[in-house]
Image (cartoon, rainbow, N blue to C red):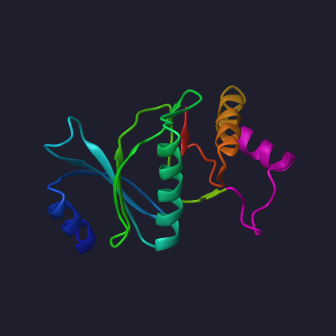
């Protein structure tokens, strides 16, 4: 926990560090506690502004639509955010879940992104398994219907 942004955010928001939950190409995720929350919550600190802004935009859209589930998958709810520190505070969710929207885009895909074609579907079905892929695909399509285009469809982000 050597990141000054994290320490400052915890202090300013009266949060207590619990443990690291994970990390990825966009940053790290921690479990934190607060007297204001009945259970631990998740804190994600981003390495760069662009993924932070994409994920925040998705959480804001889901919040405006009062969406906490995509199909059978739980979706974290945005609790707070800090644009100066590139930090998002959200609820913790258990499997099955749909999370990590740092690579998602609102309303249109970036021009460099390959199409969701037959090869993509075959690759994803192999990753998720034939039994789970239909439910995952339904969740991806439901996100698309909301204008949320998840480019990182992986078992770590959509877990059955």
Residue ID at (35%, 40%): 92
What's the magenta region? 107-126
Nearer to the camera, 64 or 8: 64
Residue 137 in picture, x, y percent from top left: 70, 36
Q: Is residue 25 in view from this perspective?
A: no
User: Could you say which quadrant of the image residue 44 lies in?
Assistant: bottom left
Residue 122 vs residue 110: left or right?
A: right
Image spot of residue 38 (x, y percent): 20, 35
Give the answer, above or below, for where 113 lies relative to 19: below
In the image, farthest residue toward the front: 64
Query: Which of the image's four quarters has the N terminus?
Result: bottom left
Residue 155 falls left or right of residue 119: left
Q: Is residue 80 left or right of residue 1?
A: right
Residue 118 magenta-highlighted: yes
Q: Is residue 100 above or below residue 91?
A: below
Residue 84: x and y, percent?
34, 73
Q: Which residue is nearer to you in this view: 41 or 118?
A: 41
- Residue 151 colored magenta? no
Judged from this view, the residue extending furthest toward the right is: 118
Q: What is the quadrant of the C terminus in the image?
A: top right
């Amino acid at each position: 926990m050597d990141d000054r942004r994290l320490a400052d955010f915890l202090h300013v928001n009266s949060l207590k560090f619990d443990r690291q939950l994970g990390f990825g190409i966009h940053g790290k995720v921690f479990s934190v506690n607060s007297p204001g929350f009945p259970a631990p919550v998740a804190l994600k600190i981003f390495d760069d502004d662009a993924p932070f802004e994409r994920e925040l935009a998705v959480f804001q859209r889901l919040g405006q639509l009062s969406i906490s589930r995509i199909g059978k998958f739980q979706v974290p709810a945005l609790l707070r955010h800090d644009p100066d520190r590139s930090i998002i505070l959200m609820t913790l969710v258990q499997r099955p879940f749909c999370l990590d929207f740092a690579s998602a885009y609102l309303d249109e895909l970036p021009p460099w992104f390959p199409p969701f074609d037959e090869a993509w579907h075959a690759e994803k079905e192999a990753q998720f398994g034939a039994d789970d892929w239909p439910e995952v695909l339904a969740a991806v399509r439901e996100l698309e219907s909301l204008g949320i285009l998840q480019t990182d469809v992986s078992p770590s982000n959509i877990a059955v």
